Image: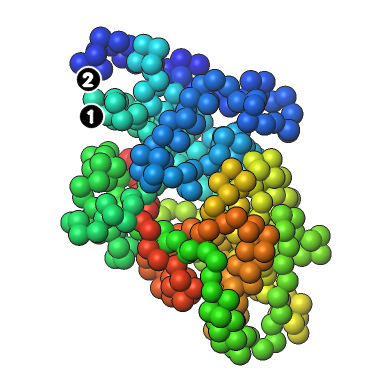
Amino acid sequence: MAGPELDGVAGTPDALTISAVDVLLAPGSGAVASAGDATADFTVCHDMRVAHELELWGNLDRCPTLAEAVEFWRGNEYEERQLYLARLGREPVGFCSVTLPLRENTHTAGIDVLISPAHRRRGLGRILRQHAETVARERGRMSLDAYHEVPLANADGAVLLPAKSGAGGLPLTAPAVAFALASGYELEQVERSSRLGLPVAPELLDQLEAEASSRAAGYGLTGWDDHCPEALVDAYARLKATMTEDVPIAGMDWEGEDWDAARVRDEERTLFRGGVQSAVTAALHLSTGELVAYTVLNWRPGVPDTIAQQDTLVAGGHRGHRLGLLVKLANLRRAQGRWPSVRSVLTWNAIENRHMLAINNALGFRPAGYEGEWQKRLG
């Protein structure tokens, strides 16, 4: 579907076209797809994302593989995802996207804009941002959110824009920060990305495990790879719902998500089709059999050196027993045994989440960068 044609954009005689991107060559042909089924336009967008990650970080540790991207952008019954490719003449110059929650947070939309380096500072980002916002507005979304990351080296010593949460800030000199501010977005929250080098010394793991276990009488550990056992899936879904309610979100206009067994299975299928493997360790309250804590690590064969730390949660009423540290330690041991090629773990935490940052610091995580969570409310 063709979008607007804008002659003379930023001094060029070419017409800018913005077109909706089909993810698959045969959309709706079935649940099973592969990266080889991606359309040419989708692959162009993904290649721009890869180039951006290499420019920003010098690696692809944070970048989805093509298989992951295909699975994500297909969307699902919980979120619709729209991707738009911009061209000047025949040349791809950037893309924008809109994500639209369908179950909860149906007043919100996620906005993203990326312009190729050779075409920046010509007004194209503003046009694509306006296009994405128009799509969101037409769908009745009045609260927009966006995020971007800044490497640690780009933030050290810089003058910072403070987050509205009161914790952390982002460098005012970063182009993405200037773009977001000029577009009317407010910096609500800053997260710290951290990296842990592997392998972790066994004596440190033993020491931390002994300290945590001494506080965790009455609790036991369980775990699984890729697929939650049927006997635990309902309890696991309840914890995942709690995670969306308890995670620090500062002033972001988000509500908690309703998770059930079907949603857990849908997530597992999506990860599997995208080539992502997962390791989960959970804590059980032995006297009740209740699942009260969990943590998740994801590994991708396409990026074999790095695993991503995903959710970690301890349910209210069971905090203060070092369960967060205990499940992380056990899952780290599981991951090092299952994926011996891994050399580091990446994780993200809100700056105000001092407790989880303290656990990560004890394990040896060190700052790697920052992520800004931005918000704009439409009138």
- Left or right, residue 367 beside residue 315: left
Using the image, tell me which numbered label, if any, was put on residue 121. 1
- Left or right, residue 45 beside residue 66: left
Residue sitting at x 53%, y 70%? 200
Using the image, tell me which numbered label, if any, was put on residue 265. none
Residue sitting at x 69%, y 82%? 219
In which quadrant of the rendered view does residue 331 lie?
Answer: bottom right
Front residue of 164 and 39: 39
Disc 2 is placed on an element classified as helix
Answer whether residue 146 is visible to the viewer in this image.
Answer: no
- Circle 1 residues within 10 Å: few <14, some 14–19, many ≥20: few
Picture quarter with the C terminus = top left
Note whether 129 is above or below 269 in the view shown.
Answer: above
**Residue ID for mark 2:** 10
Could you tell me the amino acid type at mark 1?
Arg
In which quadrant of the rendered view does residue 258 lie?
Answer: bottom right
- Circle 2 residues within 10 Å: few <14, some 14–19, many ≥20: some
In which quadrant of the rendered view does residue 248 lie?
Answer: bottom left
Front residue of 58 and 141: 58
Could you tell me the amino acid type at mark 2?
Ala
Answer whether residue 66 is visible to the viewer in this image.
Answer: yes
Pointer 2 and pointer 1: residues touching (CB < 8 Å)?
A: yes
Residue 339 image position (x, y, % from top left): 64, 57
- Sequence order check: which comes first, mark 2 or mark 1? 2
Residue sitting at x 20%, y 56%? 158
Residue 95 image position (x, y, % from top left): 41, 28
Disc 1 is placed on an element classified as loop
